[in-house]
Amino acid sequence: MSQVSPYKLAPFTSPRFMSVGSLSISSSAQRLSVARFSSLRRASLRAMTSHIVGYPRMGPKRELKFALESFWDGKSSAEELQNVAADLRSSIWKQMAEAGIKYIPSNTFSYYDQVLDTTAMLGAVPARYGWNGNEIGFDTYFSMARGNASVPAMEMTKWFDTNYHFIVPELGPDVNFCYASHKAVDEYKEAKALGIDTVPVLIGPVSYLLLSKPAKGVEKSFSLLSLVDKLLPIYKKVVSELKGAGATWIQFDEPTLVMDLEPHQLHAFTEAYSELESSLSGLNVLIETYFADVPAEAFKTLTSLKGATGFGFDLVRGTRTLELIKGGFPSGKHLFAGVVDGRNIWANDLASSLGTLQTLEGIVGKDKLVISTSCSLLHTAVDLVNETKLDNEIKSWLAFAAQKIVEVNALAKALAGQKDESFFSSNAKAQASKKSSPRVTNEVVQKDTTALKGSDSDHCRATNVIDRLDAQQKHLNLPILPTTTIGSFPQTMDVRRVRREYKAKKISEEDYVKVIKEEIQKVVKLQEELDVDVLVHGEPERNDMVEYFGEQLSGFAFSANGWVQSYGSRCVKPPIIYGDVSRPKAMTVSWSSMAQSMTKRPMKGMLTGPVTILNWSFVRNDQPRHETCYQIALAIKDEVEDLEKAGVTVIQIDEAALREGLPLRKSEQAFYLDWAVHSFRITNCGIKDTTQVCPFPPPRNYLSTCNPETVFQV
């Protein structure tokens, strides 16, 4: 892997073709002229004020994913990877410019992760990677992200409460920050060469430190915020170069301001931006927050920061922030109002959002209000145009990233007195369709869910855990420390091929079942040879632990290209929960029964739990999440009881994503845990004492004060 800078090669040379959104761009003949974009941008400045926090970087058909993996496998060169990346960046910027977006972000593209990009910019490379101190190139960059033959990768963890993951910086008192990656400046210049004046985006210095961890060998009590004085000189250099390149705005993302911060942590923001104030002179500075309400004290700190021109808020998840704005927004400052949801795929209710914006306009003034997304569109799918599996009715309810840009623009135009009546009318019809569609509402499910809203204790198993364990031991006759596996076995290429062919109706159901049965027999035989006590069938019939169940439940839809980046080149395609959820028929019983018939040992039934299905899906936004989760729980409950009737007496219910839905604010966590645990209990409250339920992962991994007996009552 060559040590080449990811941003130094000339990007616009080969005759590649890329399609992004409604734009079709060839890097030779079809690039729009700089003059045209300049004219287009001037028109948009007069008409409206709109902003996008960030945008997906994988591409509408995962072009970057395949380019990355080809490069990592040694099948393509660094230059080829850079060319694909350059095409993606330019097409995204042009897409926004054509839509009339005024504040277009740059430096939100990444080859792996935006926090890792910041680590590279700061030269905060752990010593184990043997970095030589020059401009950081692909070799060092990807070694930090993925490890190499001699050293492991840096830790990866969740980006707040999203399903995206970032590379955690490793810092200590001896770290020597230095300006080691000019990515932010290079991308700004790249866009400017196309005639597009962008807003360079940087992760703010305080959030960067708060998201870091002490390096190996450094005391856990080490104050990461003590490094702020060593960090800021690098930010000053970046700002100076951006000003020199012609930037007029800069965006600092400080999402940690939505967390429960201590007074000294809030004070760090005040100190940092006071120190940066002189360097920021001559620039308009946006400080962006997202994912939740900004607490009152943090709001006060944020809106008092020196050098700031505007402040961005998530007004989708942060509805209480509206009251703080009404109570006192600083005069003369810009309000970037995030009213278009960057976390979900539902079309915006334009009429409702316009009403909110008109209220805000009365507070801050027409010339200070900017219409924005609630957060980066990184967390949603790319373009609805590429969807072939979704029917027209469901598609009318949706908006992926490309469509959300249009929504932001439409709201901005409406606020400027240029309302597109046809677009608003079409949106209103789609909103009404979603509310009235019989596909959305199932009265039986609604009735059953309403009946669950009593005491959680109504849905616990009737006897205590000690009595159940005794009954299960007598029935199963297992050793004191029985052995089992988590569940799935590696799937061969042949199994994947046969499953694809069956879905495409290229082979018969009989032929498909024969292949899967043979694979299950191999797995059962292997486990018996290894003397495993409780067996699994290996799940060769399943594509994904959520998608497999969603495909068999009502109220779910699936996209063809609705991919969302999880980390690096890893993308997921979340199911879309659009309506009331029910189980039309058994989902796993035939496979589990088949597997049980092959052995005298207990065979586990393998199910994905309701909270995990919820948290790994795009969830409907017309009712509380916990109600949708209860509906899924009732569907899984039916499956659990049918497995028991079929003679399966050990059932594993996977809740791998239980913690992923935990709210960012501590005051909201107890309610979430109550309904999440309640949902799990619903799934198995009606089964016999002799049937053993295994939650995975064990809840003590997630709830520090609890254990299986007191939490899940299994």
Image (cartoon, rainbow, N blue to C red):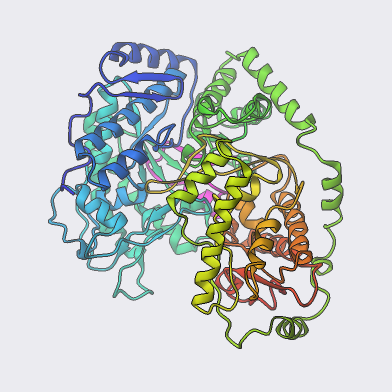
In-image side of 529 versus 196 (left or right): right
The percent coordinates of residue 322 (x first, y second) are 62, 41
Quadrant of residue 33 in the image? top left
Quadrant of residue 343 in the image? top right
Q: Nearer the viewer, residue 289 or 631?
A: 631
The percent coordinates of residue 104 (x first, y second) are 40, 29
Residue stretch in magenta:
290-315
Residue placed at 58% from the left, 46% from the top?
511
In-image side of 643 versus 265 (left or right): right
Residue 541 seen anywhere in this rendered image of the structure: no
The percent coordinates of residue 266 (x first, y second) are 46, 57
Q: Quadrant of the C terminus?
A: bottom right
Residue placed at 26% from the left, 47% from the top?
73
Q: Nearer the viewer, residue 372 or 453?
A: 453
Residue placed at 58% from the left, 79% from the top?
533
Q: Is residue 305 within the magenta segment? A: yes
* 7 w.r.t. 495: above or below: above
* 632 w.r.t. 261: above or below: above
Q: Is residue 633 within the magenta segment? A: no
In-image side of 459 versus 696 (left or right): right
Q: Nearer the viewer, residue 231 or 328?
A: 231
Residue 562 seen anywhere in this rendered image of the structure: yes
Q: Nearer the viewer, residue 301 or 389?
A: 389
The percent coordinates of residue 220 (x first, y second) are 37, 74
Residue placed at 31% from the left, 42% from the top?
68
